[in-house]
Amino acid sequence: MNIPESKEFDRRQFLKGGSLAALMALMGGVELTFAQEKKEAEAAKATDEDESDSINFGVIGLGVWGKEIISTLGRLKGAQITMICDKYPASLKRAGNMLPKAKQVADYKQILDDKEIQAVIIATPTHLHKEIVLAALQAGKHVYCEAPLANTVEDSRAIALAARANPKSYFQAGLQNRSDPQRAFLIQFIRAGAMGRNIKARTQWHKKTSWRFTSPNPDREQELNWRLQPEVSAGLMGETAIHHLDAATWFLNAKPRSVVGFGSLIQWTDGRSVHDTVQTMLEFPGSVRLNSEVCLANSFDADYEIYYGTDSAIMVRDNKAWMFKEVDSPLLGWEVYARKDTFFSETGIALMANATKQIAHGNVGPGGTNLFTPLYYALEAFVHNVGEVSSGVEDFTSTFVNADTKALADHVAKIVKLPAAGYKEGYEATLIALKANEAVNKGSRIEINKELFSL
Amino acid sequence: MKNALNTRQLVSRLALFLALSVSTSYAESVRYDAEPGSKVKIEGTSTVHDWTVEGQIIGGFMEVDSSFKLDPGLKSITVNPKVQAAVPVRSLKSGKKRMDEVMREAMKEKTHAKIDYQLLSLKVKEAPTTSGGPTSLDAIGTLTIAGVTKTNFMPVIMEMSGKSLKVTGKTKLKMTDFGIKPPAPELAMGLIKTGDDITISFEWLTTPAAVK
């Protein structure tokens, strides 16, 4: 598949805690590097793993993100990547170097035809997802589809409906925040009312980067830069801000009714028409608004989310979060003992899931940062849930030979799974992101009808 | 050669006779097949806290005399029904991945994937007051866990639930009776020792098999 091979830009890099190294350097801490983490995980994998119990995976689309997926999935217990696919030979070869045992194929259909492969991960350009997802579900594979699900609402809906119609296949959308234990902890905290009433929210993603990849081959360059082709690109809102939009609708526990957007092209005037700076305002019920921005022309303050409530504001940054309390807010008690960080003249109370447990498990690096990325947790959930759904479906169908699809779907819904974004979350986030992109492109207000959310 | 043919003919006639007699006896019985919606629960103790595992699958069937009805008379119930039930071990979940692994290992799931039950006899303890209402019975059967078969005595209640025949029951067991050493896994909290005594309770739904 035509995935960028340059490391210059990674649309989901903001989720991986880009400023972690800098923060640790400032604190004089030793950064626990990927290599160290990988070594430990690999040692654990080698001792624990029984290959006969492993699930065989195929990874389709081997660009920057596809390779990130391979290196993360490769460290997980219970997962074997036995096939990889990319139609661009150089990308296939590079990924193949990471996985010498995996079979390399240029056509994804070869993966779907292989009976030994139980699950596929689709990390191709967005507009190519639909065809592959539908074929994979048809072939009875479990599917992990990167976000956004598609570049049109229709395609995204088709994917979600196909996932729903195939309860034997476990479907997960690549909204990795949904699997992050830190986020799950924050949700409980927010739902318990620690913020007071919602007032507004703000998200930003700033990085000075061209969003363009270079290649000596003009055709390849065209393929690589699908994000800059207005006819297929979901724009900065669709490709980058979708994770923020998903997090915000989750935390605010509401769906936007409309979105106003503005886009400009200021820095990267290289003949493109896709904006390099976008600002959107999403309106939620109860006069709560979310301001979501993405800028490729200035990197100041990188990326974060802030949720403002009547009692406190919560800032989420990398894998961490802080609460900033109002003076008149009620005393919660525990915050007296919590770690605090100073941001200019404000004091942030660090919020961390199972802080003592995480430290005991060795999951926490200097500065209290969780060592594992949201992608790690998302893929861990995928591997686990595929196993649970596979065995659950097998037990069910062999026990109840005449049961219908609905009974099977009910049974699958009851299977306890690790938290992850399903087809519904994937569809809703994609819908909101695409509507935001439409608002930016039109420079106007776009209504998001309630009916659009129902599948 | 001739003798061999004769023997074969004899065998085939015998088979035909057997098939006919079996089908005759089938015609006189009603079969209820397991349907989705059942529940099974195992409760146990440990040095740290009590634990529970739950499952949603109980397979199997029940074959009863065609005159069998859950009416106040309940005469037909004395004609012992044929009952077989099975629970896939891996369908039992604690909600904790590690504990599930410990349980599957203790129950030797790789070689004994199912908990099997086979009924030997059934006696009415208390007849229902209304037709199809709850009936208390005493069941004697064999229970096979981790490959070890033991005779089991268990009070059960049968009742009609819509079209379905629902059987509920509860039985206390000892892990060691089935050759299972109570797991004592080394977890993050330190050493946890599970108690030998466990209670299995279930709610089994069966539905009349489609007439063939």
Image (cartoon, coloured by chain):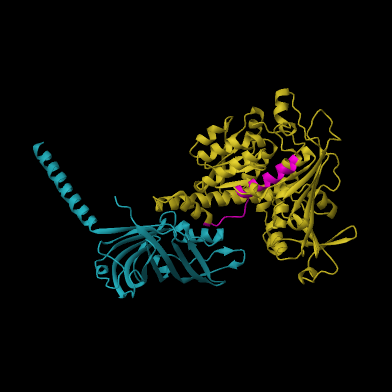
Chain colours: A yellow, B cyan
Q: Position of residue B107 (x, y in %)?
A: 44, 60
Q: In percent of the image, x 29 and y 73: which residue is there?
A: B72
Q: Residue furthest left?
A: B2
On the question of residue A169 being in view, the answer is no
Q: Nearer the viewer, residue A30 or A248?
A: A248
Total numbered badges shown on the rendered structure: 0
* Above-or-below relation of A143 to B181: above
The quadrant the N terminus of chain A occupies is top right
B204 vs B17, left or right, is: right
Q: Nearer the viewer, residue B137 or A446?
A: A446
* Above-or-below relation of A176 to A337: above
Q: In percent of the image, x 60 and y 67: which residue is there?
A: B190
Q: Nearer the viewer, residue A440 or A51?
A: A440
**Residues rendered magenta in the picture:** A414-438
On the question of residue A291 being in view, the answer is yes
Question: In which quadrant of the rendered view does residue A308 lie?
Answer: bottom right
Q: Position of residue A415 (x, y in %)?
A: 52, 56
Question: In which quadrant of the rendered view does residue A363 lie?
Answer: bottom right
Q: Residue furthest right?
A: A345
* Above-or-below relation of B41 to A296: below
Q: Main secondary structure of the magenta part?
A: helix
A373 vs B65, left or right, is: right
Q: Position of residue A109 (x, y in %)?
A: 54, 32
Q: In percent of the image, x 44 and y 58: which residue is there?
A: B57
* Above-or-below relation of A53 to B206: above
Q: Position of residue A332 (x, y in %)?
A: 77, 70
A431 vs B24, left or right, is: right
Is residue A426 in the magenta section? yes
Is residue A51 in the magenta section? no
A234 vs B84, left or right, is: right
